[in-house]
């Protein structure tokens, strides 16, 4: 007890216990165990028309090879300098020019891509090449080798830009980040493009099941098919009053999320849709595939148009309106929250 002699008031006491590496819970109890989420990230929108030039300008300053990944990170204003779009997730805009390639590596962070513009690029995931087309949802599960490339201009390569989503802040929080470059380990054997789509992409699967890689065997969920699913469903099902028609991307071998740390969604809002107010505990990043409308987060109004990216923080009241028929892509850490029994939603 000699470290804590009983003299002075509370402040003096706090100073003394701080020297011993302790601090009083009762001063921060409310902040540590809040009655509801108090997200540090804020609602924010990146208008693609305003940031596109900056993204393309990066192509004049550094090559994809030198940069390894030529990306402008989307930093949430509530999390400055933390490479975070939400507390748990990272987002960025990646550019690859005709004829370029970005070297092979792998890491324990999972990555997803939503292609914004341009033709000719591909991503190779565990030795299987996947062509990237606008609107495609492409995944790079944890610890899979991946590299990106683009056709030469003569063969139709155009500047290609996509939205990257990674669980970098989450993995950093857990101190579980590992990475390797291709020189440090052998590359996987080459698999012909389309192999996994042929094997798993039609509600059929191999009879002698391969062991799961802990993530979807499909690297690509082409926009054409996902879009068609929504369009088709609209003929059978009335849009939900909160979400319109919202589907989630699935691992066809389990019906679960494509990757364990990030879930992704595609939703159709018919023209004139005026969604009711809802909130959920997973801060969500949206990217507009088609259409125009408004996302209201609390009192904050965000007018969206194609390729805009916006954030809806945890537990913030959200309502979506569409002036034109719209398609929204979105992703969040919902699989993590569900696995831990944390995820909640409220529909008002
Ligand atoms: O494409 O592998 O935006 O490793 C950040 C880190 C993209 C990628 C990012 C990455 C990648």
Image: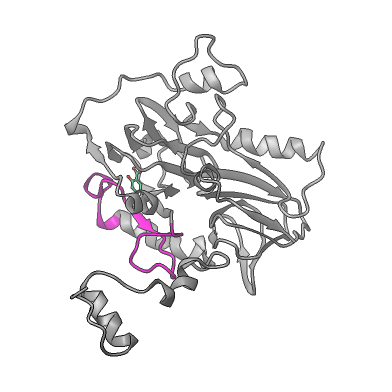
Q: Where the C terminus falls, by quadrant?
A: bottom right
The answer to whether 111 appears left or right of 70 in the picture is right
Front residue (pair 172, 299): 172
- Residue 216 in percent (x, y) is at 49, 30
185 is within the stretch colored magenta: no
The answer to whether 49 appears left or right of 82 in the picture is right
Q: Does 259 sit above or below residue 63? A: above
Which residues make up the magenta segment? 60-87
82 is within the stretch colored magenta: yes
Q: Residue furthest bottom?
A: 8
Front residue (pair 128, 116): 128
Q: Where the N terminus falls, by quadrant?
A: bottom left
Q: Residue furthest top?
A: 208
What residue is at 25 percent from the left and 50 percent from the top? 67
Q: How is the image coloured?
A: one colour
Front residue (pair 184, 20): 20
What residue is at 42 percent from the left and 26 percent from the top? 213
Q: Does 321 sit above or below residue 341? A: below
Count numbered badges in the picture. Answer: 0
- Residue 91 in percent (x, y) is at 43, 54
What residue is at 49 percent from the left and 72 percent from the top? 30
- Residue 23 in percent (x, y) is at 32, 73
- Asked which quadrant contains residue 4, the reply is bottom left
Q: Main secondary structure of the magenta part?
A: loop
Front residue (pair 219, 157): 219
The answer to whether 5 appears left or right of 80 in the picture is left
What residue is at 66 percent from the left and 41 percent from the top? 247
Q: Does 33 sit above or below residue 94? A: below
């Amino acid at each position: 007890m000699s470290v804590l002699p009983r003299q002075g008031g509370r402040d003096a006491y706090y100073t003394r216990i701080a020297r011993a590496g302790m601090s009083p819970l009762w001063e921060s109890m409310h902040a540590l165990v809040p009655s509801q989420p108090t997200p540090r990230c804020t609602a924010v929108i990146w208008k693609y028309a305003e940031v596109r030039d900056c993204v393309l300008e990066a192509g004049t300053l550094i090559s994809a090879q030198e940069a390894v990944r030529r990306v402008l990170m989307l930093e949430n204003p509530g999390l400055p300098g933390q490479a975070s779009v939400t507390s748990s997730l990272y987002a960025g805009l990646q550019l690859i020019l005709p004829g370029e390639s970005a070297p092979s590596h792998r890491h324990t962070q999972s990555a997803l891509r939503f292609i914004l513009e341009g033709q000719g690029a591909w991503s190779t995931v565990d030795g299987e090449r996947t062509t990237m087309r606008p609107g495609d949802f492409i995944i790079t599960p944890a610890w899979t080798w991946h590299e990106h490339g683009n056709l030469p201009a003569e063969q139709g390569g155009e500047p290609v830009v996509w939205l990257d989503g990674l669980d970098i802040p989450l993995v950093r929080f857990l101190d579980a980040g590992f990475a390797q470059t291709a020189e440090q380990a052998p590359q996987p054997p080459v698999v012909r493009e389309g192999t996994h789509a042929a094997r798993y992409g039609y509600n059929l699967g191999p009879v002698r099941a391969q062991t799961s890689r802990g993530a979807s065997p499909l690297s690509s969920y082409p926009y054409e098919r996902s879009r068609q699913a929504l369009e088709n469903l609209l003929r059978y099902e009335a849009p939900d009053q909160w979400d319109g028609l919202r589907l989630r991307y699935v691992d066809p071998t389990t019906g679960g999320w494509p990757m364990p740390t990030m879930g992704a969604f595609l939703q159709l809002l018919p023209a004139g849709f005026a969604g009711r107010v809802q909130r959920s505990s997973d801060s969500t990043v949206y990217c507009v595939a088609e259409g125009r409308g408004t996302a209201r987060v609390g009192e904050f109004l965000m007018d969206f148009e194609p390729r805009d990216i916006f954030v809806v923080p945890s537990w913030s009241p959200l309502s979506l309106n569409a002036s034109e028929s719209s398609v929204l892509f979105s992703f969040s850490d919902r699989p993590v929250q569900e696995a831990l029994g944390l995820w909640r939603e409220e529909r008002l």
